[in-house]
Image (cartoon, rainbow, N blue to C red):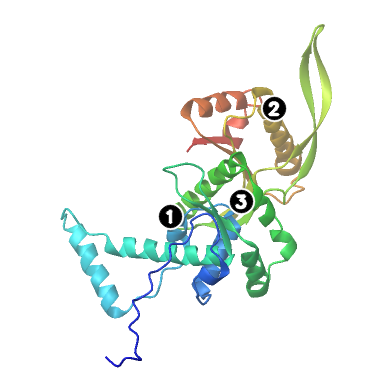
Amino acid sequence: MPPDTIALAPERTKHRPRFRRAAREDRPVFRLTDRDREMIKIIFEYRFITAGMLQDLVTPVKLTKNQQDAIEKLRAYKQAGATGTPDGAQTKTRREILRRLQMLYHAGYVQRQKLADGEPIIYSLGNLGADELMLHHGIDRQKIDWTTKAREAGERYIHHGLIISRFRHALEMALRDVPGVSLDSWIPSGAFKAKVRYQDTVRTREGTRTQIVDGVVIPDWLFVLKVGDKFIHCFLEADRSKMDHRRYLSKLKSYYAFYQTYVRDEKKAGIQQMRVLTVTISEARKDNLRETAHHVSSEGKCLFWFACE
């Protein structure tokens, strides 16, 4: 070896922090792809999401003929009832999504948080991701100004948002196997608001009396299902057992007043059918909420629906 030649050992890849963005000189160099933009848009629509959900929702990568043939052989192997089947394709896809999410995080396109040990990392939109949505998809920046709120959100707010995200993920996956039914629209929290007025009976020391109550309907989320040529508006409520019986009953009464005024009788809101869906965290809580709905109206049996995660 000539004396002026120096052999350099290969530089070891630096371990980047998981929940703190790496220094600018240590950030990975990458090119933003259309699939990255699709993931950013899904994260924006869900607000809080895990890598596992993204893996199900993002458009699959186009495969070569050899790759497709390999997958078909793997499927045939599974259908033959073999045990110990490798799951290489799934693992490779998940690893690639995690790699891209790491790059998007350190570059500032997404944010990530971990609520507790044993739970998956939660992803939300970052400021550069919001800019990309505005430039690439033409989404109004004011509609995504909640990124700061997401970054500063407390654990309780994130848990509440995850109930909605898990429900939406399950719904979208289920609808893939239901012909003739599709998700027409998904309207975020705060975008729908309706004032109602109804007559209610309250207890006093002298007995009971009737009073006029001014209520408001603000669902956690609102989505519309298209079933054939009909549309069903579904008002979604996420319950983490933090709301007392009286407040929840008042919420259901407002929904029922909205149904009477705008759907059943006068159809002012342009809604053909509606349901109020409450997703909660335990079977006992679900049964208690269903019992509460019985105090609203006999029609509540069809109007109010309940599920446990």
Residue furthest toward the front? 3
Q: Earlier in the sequence, mark 2 or mark 3?
A: 3
Q: How far from the left and from the top, in percent, is residue 71? A: 26, 68
Residue furthest toward the top? 206
Residue at horizontal 61 percent and vertical 66 percent from the top: 129
Q: Which residue is mark 1?
A: 52
Pick whichever, 242 or 296, lies toward us: 242
Is there any visible trace of residue 27 in the rendered image? no
Q: Callout 1: few (<14), some (14-19), or many (20+) C-alpha neighbours within 10 Å?
A: few
Q: What kind of residue is marked 3?
A: Phe
Foreground tag (2 vs 1): 1
Q: Earlier in the sequence, mark 3 or mark 1?
A: 1
Figure check: 199 above or below 259: above
Left or right placement of residue 300 versus residue 12 in this view: right
Q: Which residue is mark 3?
A: 223
Q: Which residue is mark 2?
A: 247
Q: Dot 2: what SS? A: helix
Pick whichever, 205 or 74, lies toward us: 74
Q: Callout 3: few (<14), some (14-19), or many (20+) C-alpha neighbours within 10 Å?
A: some
Residue at horizontal 45 percent and vertical 56 percent from the top: 51
Q: How far from the left and from the top, in percent, is residue 217? A: 73, 40
Q: Dot 3: what SS? A: strand
